[in-house]
Amino acid sequence: MGSLGIVAVLYALMSAVITGMVPSTDIDVDAPFAIAFRQRDMRWAESIISFGAVAAITTALVSSLMGQPRVYMVMARDGLLPKWFSTVHPTRGTPVNASLFTGVTTGVLSLLVDIEILAQLVSIGTLAIFASVCAGLLVRRHTPEGDVSVHDRTPALLRCFGLVVACVLFAATNVVSSGRGTTESSSGSATSSTTTSTSSTASTTASYVVSGLLFGAIAAATVSFNSLPRYNTPKKGFCTPFVPYLPAAGVLATTQLIASLGPLAWLRFVVYTVLCAVAYVWYGAAGIRSGRHDDTTSYDSRGRDTPHHPFQRLGDEDEPASSSNRRSPFATTLYGDEKGLHLENTRDVTDGEVELVTRTSRAI
């Protein structure tokens, strides 16, 4: 929370500075700060800002190129991608095939696809993830722990569904009203100015009424979570405050931003989301039917190699023992294979508390 607060304050101060230097309508969206300082004949500041922007973009790209291959590797080990993506370098312990695939596809997309389209795809995908995390947090905090029936999940799921629908309709209403206002203002004429003004006023009033009703529905859905018992609240580490109000505000904010990207961005997002979902489901189901994933190796509580299906949940008898010298069932889930390095996670039980111990070792 402290780092987020610092970043938010810095962003607010930067916005205040640039709007004080340049009118908001004249800000260059491609390089706002560099152009603003150039217009003030402060070339030295422009150079510093440009260098910092290049360094920040490079850091973000390198971070993405390091994280995405590991996502591919875990998906391959879960059976959602070919096993080729899970290959780890024998000496460096890095996902070499997934890294190569990520670098090539990123380069090809940057060369062939318009940067505006890529920016919209990345933005809407990130916003959709943020919205799903906020909604998922609301469901998790109000669903009992452990294996529960559909009936136990229904109250939280229904409230979350109502919240999401109200947020989407609220965002759609704002988009439609703003588009109607722009169309009416551009199509007006001297002979019909009175009629256009009257109809515009009526449409604006109606949009305000609908938006107010939808915002009331959002508030009611948010408050309704308080009638449910609270579960799964972290006792240690970070805990999201102001639940359910902060996650609900996150859903509302992200849906507003998604709506502002336009119909083409929505269509592209729906198309590639459906295609990816179909591909993942088909490949996983085909792997289960053909037994392609049955050779996955895991370890039982006595350290023996046992066949373990990637979609099979461990039973109580397969839980790792308290001794840290025994292999974890998830020892090779994330990093390395039989020839490479991996991070082995084991669990120690001390005074009734479970502690996760991570150590680097060489697979046997």
Image (tube, helix red, strand yellow):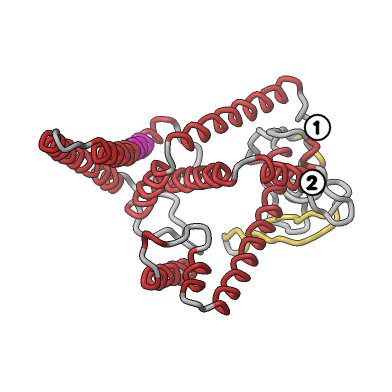
Tell me the magenta residue range: 157-166
Residue plotted at (66% across, 63% down) = 59
Q: 141 or 191, which is in the foreground? A: 191
Is residue 97 part of the magenta span, yes or no?
no
Is residue 158 part of the magenta span, yes or no?
yes
For marks 2 and 1, give the one nearer the viewer: 2
Q: 83 or 45, which is in the foreground? A: 45
Q: Amino acid at mark 2?
A: Leu
Tell me: 259 left or right of 85.
left
Rendering coords of residue 156 (x, y %): 36, 39
Q: Amino acid at mark 1?
A: Asp
Q: 73 or 224, which is in the foreground? A: 73
Q: Is residue 309 visible?
A: yes
Q: Is residue 206 visible?
A: no
Instruction: Determine whether the residue tagged by mark 2 lies in a helix, strand or loop.
Output: helix
Q: 81 or 290, which is in the foreground? A: 81
Decide: is 179 above or below 252.
above
Residue plotted at (77% across, 46% down) = 302
Q: Which residue is mark 2?
A: 100
Instruction: Determine whether the residue tagged by mark 1 lies in a helix, strand or loop.
Output: loop
Rendering coords of residue 363 (x, y %): 85, 52
For marks 2 and 1 on the same chain, the one whose residue lies earlier in the sequence:
2
Q: Which residue is mark 1?
A: 295
